[in-house]
Image: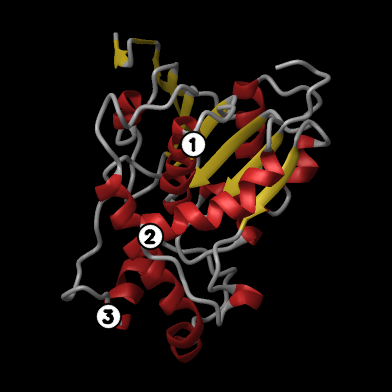
Amino acid sequence: MSARERPVLLCFHHAGAGPSAFTGWSRVLDGAAEVLPVQLPGRGPRFREPRITNPSDLDQYLKHLLDPLVGHRPHVLYGHSLGGLVAHRWTLRRETEGHRPPDLVALGAVSPSPPRPPLSGTELTDATLLEFIASLRTPTDGATVDQGIWSRFVLPVLRADLRLAIALADATPPFPEGAISSPILAVSGLDDPLVPPGAMAGWADRTRAGFTERTVRGGHFFAHDTRVPALIAEEAGMTGAVGESRDRTKVRAIRLKTGRAE
């Protein structure tokens, strides 16, 4: 990537979250890229808006929100957990329509077929969701969880996002139709109980370019660590980033030939 080309870094948040997951990323990249967190509706100040739970609605939402913004500019994507499935879906749809592909698609803490939390019929109960959140050691900044507030404001968003994640995984076509022309960087957390290192290897069949898997220290929510944007900058060849990626363990570094791992 040329030093004269300032790319856009589109960031897609994990289930139940919002743009705050990427706080500090602009400081780390220090002008090497324009960081643009993408917020799905139905959370934060847009809490009363309908939440997206199916891929076709997601396609239309992102097409109107992002396509005019990105245009022909160089761009890199990072999607964390649910956001990884969203980023891959947006890339695949754009490619079929003839748009410029991302220079890099970085995916964190998600496999192409993510593990599914136990369902009660078609919905997750509040109790099941709270148990699921606890199992992932969700960061709460040391605050006591008020289950009343969570049941009203957090769990409805998380429930809808998990439904979307399952629908996206089911809707992704297999290789070769489901493969993109951009290289994929898969990032996993060493202590992630949901998507441990090595569980993201399936993304190798979702790209016709290069596939690399890297690890960072942390659990499922390592996107809050500013080492992640530094790693993305390194992989994408961005110049000017001030961050340093200290977690350099390369668990998988696979070059692909005709979309399959050699």
Q: Earlier in the sequence, mark 1 or mark 2?
A: 1
Q: Badges 2 and 3: C-beta atoms under 8 Å apart?
A: no
Dot 2 amino acid type: Leu
How many numbered marks, from 0 up?
3
Q: Badges 1 and 3: C-beta atoms under 8 Å apart?
A: no
Q: At 38% from the left edge and 47% from the top edge, which residue is drawn?
A: 192
Q: Residues within 10 Å of mark 1 (few under 14, many from 20)?
A: many
* Residue 245 rendering spot, x and y as whole percentages: 63, 29
Q: Earlier in the sequence, mark 2 or mark 3?
A: 3
Tell me: residue 63, above or below residue 145.
above
- Mark 2 highlights which residue? 136
Q: Residues within 10 Å of mark 3 (few under 14, many from 20)?
A: some
Q: At 41% from the left edge and 39% from the top edge, which residue is drawn?
A: 190
Q: Earlier in the sequence, mark 1 or mark 3?
A: 1
Give the quadrant of the N terminus.
top right
* Residue 207 rendering spot, x and y as whole percentages: 39, 24
Seen as rendered, the residue at the extreme front is: 97
Find numbered disc 3 in the image and state the secondary structure of the residue it sits on.
loop
Tell me: residue 64, above or below residue 249.
below
Residue 203 visible in the current orientation: yes
Q: At 35% from the left edge and 30% from the top edge, which residue is drawn?
A: 203
Q: Which mark is residue 125?
A: 3
